Every structure is written in C-alpha cells, then in structure tokens.
Image (tube, rainbow, N blue to C red):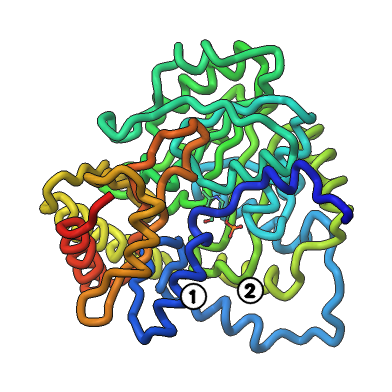
Amino acid sequence: MPTISKKGQLMPESPIRKLVPYAENAYKQGKTVYHLNIGQPDIKTPQVALDAIKIHSLDILAYTRSEGSEGYRKKIADYYAKNDIQVNHDDIIVTTGGSEALLFAFGTITDVDDEIIIPEPFYANYNGFSTASGVKVVPVISKIEDNFALPPIEEFEKLITPKTKGILICNPGNPTGYLYSKEEIKKLAKIVKKHDLFLIADEVYREFAYDGITHYSILQEEGLEKHAIVIDSVSKRYSMCGARIGCLVSKNKDVIKTALKFAQARLSPPTLAQIASEAALETPQSYFDDVIKEYVDRRNVLIEELNKIEGVQVANPKGAFYCIAQLPIKNSDAFAQWLLESFDIDGETVMVAPAGGFYSTPGVGLNQIRIAYVLNKDSLKKAVHILKEALKVYKD
Ligand SMILES: Cc1ncc(COP(=O)(O)O)c(C=O)c1O
C-alpha cells in the first residue's frame, strides 16, 4: 500500500467544516440548520461586480500575469491610498484568495522547522497553512477575560528563538473580533525591528471596524517597510467569497520578488474574478455604510442574547463578524455534534464551530465555540434561543 505523507497526516481538519456531514444528515431529516459556523456572509455582492462579469467582452478566457493584471493592481493601489496606505502596484501580488496569499507568505519567509508566533485563538487555517509549509506555530495566548487584547510584549519576547521568522496577527481578528489599536501595532513594530522579524498582518476584515474605531494597518507604520507583509482579500469586503481573489502586499522588494516565483508556479490568479474584483472597487461608500450598520446591529443582538444565558462568557467584538463564546460545558466538539445529531426545537437546530481548532495549545478553548454573525437578526435570535435551551439539557 503506498503511504500518505507525514505532512498530509498532520494536516488538521478545518473546525469550521469538519461537522458538515452531521449538518447534511440533519437536512436529510428535514431539519433547518442555522449556520453560525462559517464566515459566509448573507450580504449581497455589489451589483457593479456582478454586472462586470455579465457584460465582459472577452473572446478568450486567458491567463493574466502571475502577479495579477496591471490595471487591477493599479486600482488596488488607489484603494489603499484612499485608506491612507501608500503602496505602488508593484508592491502587490494578486492571489487566489487571502488563503493563497498566506501560503505565499509562509513560502517566502519560512523554511521547514522555522517558527511563527501567533496570538491565539487564531484563524484555524493558519494551523493548516503552517503544517503545509512545515512551520511550527508558536502560540501566545490572548485571553477571553482581557477581551483578547494583545498579550504583553514580554510574552512575545520570551518566545523568540533563532528559528523565529515572524509574528502573524489577524486585524480585525477572526475568531475574536479584536481590533488592535495603533499603540499595539507600534509595540509589535518595535519587537519585529529589534529582532529582525517579519510582521504579517491578515487584514481581510479591514472595513469591518466598529464603534468609531479606525483600523490601523501595519503598512501605515513608518520604518516597517522591510518587515511588513499584508494579507488581503475581496471575499468578505464585497461578500465575494466565491471569487477567490486576494492579494499579498509588501514594500519589501525581496518579499515580492520571491512571492512572485510562487505565483508563477501556479501561473495566474482567476481572470474573470479579477474583472469582478476590479469592478467591485467602484462600490459606493453607501454599500459599506449599510453593511457595517447591519453587522453592528447583528453583533449587538448576538452579544446581548448570549449574555442572557447563564454560565456563558463572551468577549465583545470590535471588528470582523465573529465572536468566541465560552460555554458551561467541557467539550465543544461533542456539544456541536450533539446539536446537529440530537437536538432541535420544532425541527430547527444550530451549527457552531468548536473553538479548540482555533488554538494550537492542546486542551485550550475546548469549552468555547466560535460564532459567525452572518445571519439576519431574527435568525440570530432564534439560533441563540436554541443554544440556550440546548445548554439546559446537554450533559457532557
Ligand atoms: C482571517 C482570515 N484570513 C484569510 C481568510 C481566507 O479567505 P479567502 O481565501 O476567501 O480570501 C479568511 C476566510 O475566512 C479569514 O477569516
């Protein structure tokens, strides 16, 4: 029997998707499942983007340049300028989603056995991308009691070894909804400069910053040009998850030159989706105003309802559209499966993401779940009601 690679065996399952077969069984039994497990927004994609792919005039659906079409990259640079971020189109490589930008970043700055420090809980697929690259994730724990604020700088410094290549943050954070302040970014900038490390910031939720707080990008931090790598995506910004378009941005020419070689190996990002993504940049501000208002309302409803459940602790998200909730249970994997298999109210149940997979420290987060507030307020209320009733009868 031919054998599977060790790396393949070590690849973690996505905690967001691993319960899908149980959800499918629930559908087969005629149940309605409220999906709080996945960041697939129900928000409409901007019409300009949809129109652009309907009316394009291509005769051949050809490859584009490996780094993405020049016209699109120039418009992305204009988008950043509007966000107070000064980059050139040559500092941008268009990728197949933010996911590929993360893979290119790992490929560009790490070798097998190198280490990347990541505040946890973190976006679960960072575990997958680092395993695929043979890289060790070194977690620094941010706590629900502190609302998941940046851990003290000394905690990072304690973890730096000769193998450390960088620090990876997600800002605003998935799964915590934490939004790093300018001061926190400055602290990180100081460490990476002192220890000559890269700072990778996954900023795919940049627009989703609430309560009047302005997002501060690592690309706005002066003196960080050689260190900063930004991961970006159209997936959530324009509710275009299926376009599969993102980008990697860095002012470090060596980073771009190297990431381009990875990009050349996969030839081209999707051509038609670049057309849609370029058009999406024309989306009027009113679209974002409406979307942000909707997410803030949903967050408020969700947090208020969760706080009413006895024994539930929840951090208040300031950005993105997720939160981590700590439940009065021992094992959220078993609980999430049980919800799909054995619990419903009038034929309705809930799918949540067990939070253990958002940590790399074994045993941490097992009593937590991640909730994506990507459903309308009524559905969120119903879903939280189901959770509340389920917790009353669930036995670990
Ligand atoms: C924090 C974060 N980074 C990156 C991604 C990857 O998104 P995509 O590949 O769709 O751009 C996601 C998707 O949910 C995410 O939440």
Residue appearing at x 49%, y 48% in the figure: 83
Whether residue 104 is visible, yes or no, is: no
Few, some or many residues within 10 Å of mark 2 (<14, 14–19, 20+): many
Looking at the image, residue 255 sits to the left or right of residue 189; the answer is right
Looking at the image, residue 367 sits to the left or right of residue 191; the answer is left
The kind of residue tagged 1 is Pro
Q: CA distance from mark 1 to mark 2?
A: 10 Å
Residue appearing at x 30%, y 35% in the figure: 144
Furthest toward the front, the residue is 1
Residue on which disc 1 sits: 46
Few, some or many residues within 10 Å of mark 1 (<14, 14–19, 20+): many
Residue appearing at x 22%, y 45% in the figure: 328
Residue on which disc 2 sits: 276
* Residue 21: mark in rendering: none
Looking at the image, residue 395 sits to the left or right of residue 113; the answer is left
The relative height of residue 183 versus residue 104 in the rendered view (above or below) is: above
Q: Position of residue 26 (x, y in %)?
A: 40, 77
Dot 1 falls on a residue whose secondary structure is loop
Residue 348 quadrant? bottom left
The kind of residue tagged 2 is Ala
Of residues 152 and 17, the one nearer the viewer is: 17
The relative height of residue 344 versus residue 390 in the rendered view (above or below) is: below
Q: Position of residue 10 (x, y in %)?
A: 68, 43
